[in-house]
Amino acid sequence: MKAECYIEIEFDSESTAKNVLKAVEVDNFDFVKSEIKGKKLFSTIQSNSVSSMIHTMDDYLACVNVASKIVDKN
């Protein structure tokens, strides 16, 4: 079975969105495809099972959360 998830996150500014993407994209490998459109980060996550999808989403969103907190402090 193949699972796919789409995530859209809006930030306060385009520069924040770009900096968050720079911080997390190094760990994306083939599982996550991301792009910026204005202030929004669009991500597509693909996995071979639902349990793997949940794990990947959890990791990805945790990384985005940490990166956004760091970017906001600068």
Image (cartoon, grey):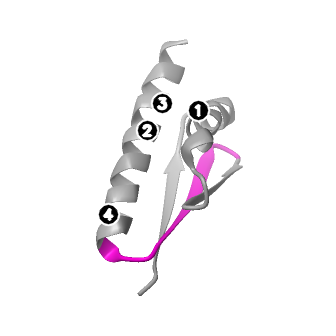
Tags 2 and 1 touching, CB below 8 Å: yes
- Whether residue 46 is in magenta: the answer is yes
Tags 1 and 4 touching, CB below 8 Å: no
Tell me where the magenta segment starts and ends, as one range. Answer: 38-50
Q: Amino acid at mark 2?
A: Cys
Q: Earlier in the sequence, mark 3 or mark 2?
A: 2
**Front-lying residue, 9 or 29:** 29
Which residue sits furthest top?
74
* Secondary element at tag 1: helix
Q: Earlier in the sequence, mark 3 or mark 4?
A: 4
Q: Is residue 8 above or below residue 16?
A: below
The residue that mark 2 highlights is: 63
Left or right placement of residue 33 versus residue 56 in this view: right
Q: Amino acid at mark 1?
A: Ala
* Secondary element at tag 3: helix
* Secondary element at tag 4: helix
Tags 3 and 1 touching, CB below 8 Å: no
For discs 3 and 2, the disc positioned in front in the rendered view? 2
The residue that mark 4 highlights is: 54
Q: Earlier in the sequence, mark 4 or mark 2?
A: 4
The residue that mark 1 highlights is: 23
Which residue sits furthest bottom?
1
Q: Which residue occupies 50% across, 50% down?
A: 9
For discs 3 and 4, the disc positioned in front in the rendered view? 4
Residue 56: percent from left, percent from top = 40, 57
* Secondary element at tag 2: helix
Local packing at callout 3 (Cα closer than 10 Å; few below 14, some 14-19, many 20+) is: some
Q: Earlier in the sequence, mark 3 or mark 1?
A: 1
The residue that mark 3 highlights is: 68
Left or right placement of residue 41 versus residue 4 in this view: right
Distance of label 3 from label 4 (alpha carbons): 21 Å
Residue 13: percent from left, percent from top = 62, 33
